[in-house]
Amino acid sequence: MTKDKWHGHIAIFSANILFGLNIPIAKTLMPEWIDPIGLTFLRMSFGALAFWITSLFVLNEKVSKKDLLILFFCAILGTTMNQFTFIKGLGMTSPIDAGLIVTMNPMMVMLISALILKEPITAKKASGVLIGACGAVLIIWHSYAVGTSGGSGSSMTGNLLCFISVICYATYLVISKPIAQRYSPVTLMKWMFLFSTILMFPFSIQEVVEAKLFSPDTTFSALASVFYVVFAATFLAYLFIPIALKRIRPTTISMYNYAQPLVAATLAILMGQDRLTWDKPVAAVLVFTGVYLVTQSKSRADIERASGK
C-alpha cells in the first residue's frame, strides 16, 4: 500500500472514530437540550462558518458553475437529506432497526459504484462487505438483546426514512469521488455546508431559537457536548472525508462505517454505561477483516493496468 493510500485510510478511520464518539455524546443533548433537527442545523451552520473561515488561510480555488451544481447535489445527498431523514427515521423507529439498516451502507456503495463508476464487484470485495456487516450486526444485536430497550417501537415509515438516508450517503460518496480529485477538502466542504445550511434553515431555525441549550438553564457539560458535536464530529470529521475520497475507493471508505458501533461501545464501557462482553472483540475482528479484504480487492484501474489497457 502506498503512503498516499495510508493517509486516506488514516483520515477516514479518524472520521469514523469522531462519528462513533458522537453517538453517545449527542444522545446526552437530545431531546432535553435541543431537538434533533435543531442540532443538525447547528452542525451544518457551524460547519459552513468554520470551513469558510478556514478557506481564508488556504489556497483560494475558483469552482466552475458546473462543479458548483455537483456540490449542490452533494450537499443535498451527503449532509441535508442524509442527516434529516436519518434523524426523523430514528425518532420513529427502534434504535436496533436503525442500526441494522445503516450497516447496509457499504453494500449500497458497492452497487452504486458498479453502476456509476463501473467498479468491479469482485468475490474478495463482496466477502469483505459481508464479513464486516456481520461484525456490525453482531455488536448491535447483542447490545439490544441483553439490554432493556429491546427491539420495540419499529416503524415501517421510520425504517424507510433510515434506508433513504443510507442511499443518499452512499450516492454522495460515489458521485463526489471525481470532484474530490479536483479541489481541496476545504473548498468542497465550504460550499457543501453553505448549501446545506440554506436548505435546512426554514425547517430548523425555530428549533434552535427555542432550544433549552441557549437558555439560562444551560450547563457547562451541555455546552461542551455541543462543542464536540459541531467542531470534532462535524468540522474535523467532514474535513477528513474528502481527504480520504482523494486517495481511496468509496467502497473502502464506507467499510469504516462499521467501526462506529465499536467506538461507541468502547466509550460506553469507559464511561461505565456498558461492560466488555464476548461480542465486542469478535465484532472488531470481523469488521477489520472485512476492511482488509475490501482494501486488498482489485479496483477498476488495477484490472485495466493488469490487462494492459
Image: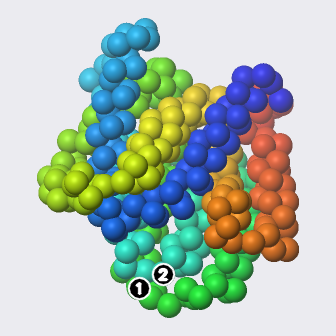
Looking at this view, is 235 or 138 the one in front?
235
Decide which of tag 2 and tag 1 comes sooner along the chain. 2
Q: Position of residue 101 (x, y in %)?
A: 55, 71
Q: Residue at x 18, y 48 (%)?
A: 201
Q: Which residue is mark 2?
A: 94
Q: Is residue 152 above or below residue 218?
A: below
Q: Is residue 180 above or below residue 93?
A: above
Q: Which residue is mark 1?
A: 155
Residue type at mark 2 is Ser
Q: Position of residue 227 (x, y in %)?
A: 42, 43
Residue 190 shown left or right of residue 203 in the figure: right
In the drawing, what numbered circle is on residue 63?
Answer: none
Q: Is residue 43 above or below residue 271?
A: above
Residue type at mark 1 is Ser
Q: Residue at x 32, y 61 (%)?
A: 33
Q: CA distance from mark 2 to mark 1?
A: 7 Å
Which quadrant does the N terminus fall into?
top right
Q: Position of residue 19 (x, y in %)?
A: 55, 50
| Disc 2 and disc 1 in contact, CB within 8 angstroms | yes
